[in-house]
Amino acid sequence: MAFTYRRQLTIEWGQCDPAGIVFNSRFFEIFDANTWRLFEAALSVKPHELADAFGIFGIPLVDVSANFIKPIKFGDVVDTASRISEFRRSSFDVEHRLSVNGELAVEGNETRVWASRRKDDPEKLGGATIPDDVIARFEPA
Amino acid sequence: MAFTYRRQLTIEWGQCDPAGIVFNSRFFEIFDANTWRLFEAALSVKPHELADAFGIFGIPLVDVSANFIKPIKFGDVVDTASRISEFRRSSFDVEHRLSVNGELAVEGNETRVWASRRKDDPEKLGGATIPDDVIARFEPA
Amino acid sequence: MAFTYRRQLTIEWGQCDPAGIVFNSRFFEIFDANTWRLFEAALSVKPHELADAFGIFGIPLVDVSANFIKPIKFGDVVDTASRISEFRRSSFDVEHRLSVNGELAVEGNETRVWASRRKDDPEKLGGATIPDDVIARFEPA
Amino acid sequence: MAFTYRRQLTIEWGQCDPAGIVFNSRFFEIFDANTWRLFEAALSVKPHELADAFGIFGIPLVDVSANFIKPIKFGDVVDTASRISEFRRSSFDVEHRLSVNGELAVEGNETRVWASRRKDDPEKLGGATIPDDVIARFEPA
């Protein structure tokens, strides 16, 4: 099992909609925050220092999906678990699982690029090769 | 081509992140708002009256995905187009396309349920049959 | 000094704007969450059980203000401290202070009502008398 | 009466909380967007070109307050009106008024700085003198 970042959070009033459940866009905020924290946990680099530490522009999102299995309500205590499910040369997938009382409630998948400015056109971003020692940090202990 | 709802919007400062582009969760707010407006346009029913008008609980989201093709920046004028790509017995798919200057920038797909409270357990939701005359309203003119 | 709720949080990418600092609306999410947590800490009642526990509708906000003293950036570690600054018969003020590295960065003040449904018109809310034993829980130890 | 920017908006599902009314932080998104649009309407400069057009860093917010007079619900049609209530040498106040069915529901006030990078320390911002011809554009016709 790959290196996994876990945190627990409690759903706030302002994250919920008139049906009393978390509004869907809020889950993508949680996914994004968890990806940064997963990298921080694996690489011991603060999120706002990640780009400089690895000479990249960042890790922009190219695809994301979510599957809502059970509604999550105001006050629910949510266990989140995030891990890299696949590394490719210059992109990777992150899997997020949110559970309440041990039952899976929301699943998310992000595809992100390890991106740097293109030498021929610095206004544009391109995929850079993910260093082997970065990948190694996410491997099972 | 199915009935399509279109609106133009201009990206606000508060929708953008430190890279100067729309933060991904904001697109799901746009998708959600467009789905309500698509139903309003097709059925001539205000979003907040949709549930009562059709005797349902609502149209909860069960799956959503987005594909980020080109970054969208602060001040960009975005053309959005949303339509039902498929109706099934009690669920349906909504396709959202966001373009800037005629180029597709973001694609989104939602799967939603035409949901009512279950008779055996009103605390739970179940899929109800989507009325034929609802489906007919979304057909090509 | 009144009973004070404190928590530390780290600013996320998605909370920041193109200037790289927290977008102002995000602070009101923090204030709101802290008020619920302040009540939870003082009264030992979960936020989503507060209304039922005290036979009220809720604690709606009637006024709020914020003063931005220093910008707060992506990755900043923020110490938050929230307390009731004044109780009146059926309303109260909450003071929120956010500091980074020991320096006050943002101050917020909310005025909220201890509200119940009006007997003459249950569609409307009115102020209810805040119980003395609620007020006592927020007094200095 | 000063130059006033007006727009109408319809409250979305995702802007509302479990009480079915607009969550307070959403109003600050509306205030912010309206301030940019007020400047666009008065100065004929796109929001994302404002800083460059006037050689400033931007118009950062230093104080903001809101007064919630009547709840605004999902589906409500809101008339917004925003104007500069006062100009000072390097700062100004913006007043926002949101009405539903002709009744004032929310009032907001922002204080912002006409800010540029300080010559002695470009990391810091300072107030710059607001040009007379900018101020003139906001005067009553």
Image (cartoon, coloured by chain):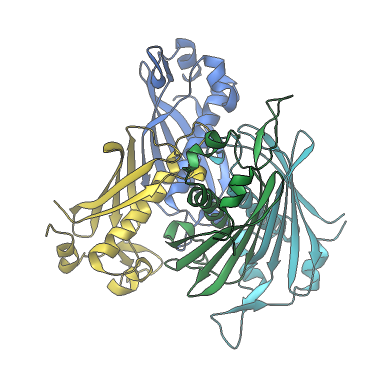
Chain colours: A green, B cyan, C yellow, D blue
Q: In percent of the image, x 37 and y 55: which residue is there?
A: C33
Q: Relative to C52, is A133 on the left or the right?
A: right
Task: Count the labels in the image.
Answer: 0
The answer to whether one can see residue A108 in this image is yes
Residue D118, position in %: x, y? 40, 15
Q: In percent of the image, x 81 and y 64: which residue is there?
A: B86
In this rendering, is residue A87 above or below D60? below
The answer to whether one can see residue D69 in this image is no
Residue that protrudes farthest toward the left in the picture = C141
Quadrant for residue C75, please give it.
top left
Quadrant for the N terminus of chain B, please.
bottom right
Residue B42, position in %: x, y? 75, 58
Q: In percent of the image, x 56 and y 70: which residue is there?
A: A105
In depth, the one of A104 and D70 nearer the eye is A104
Quadrant for the C terminus of chain B, please.
bottom right
In this rendering, is residue A97 above or below D115? below
In this rendering, is residue D131 above or below C94? above
In depth, the one of D98 and D131 nearer the eye is D131
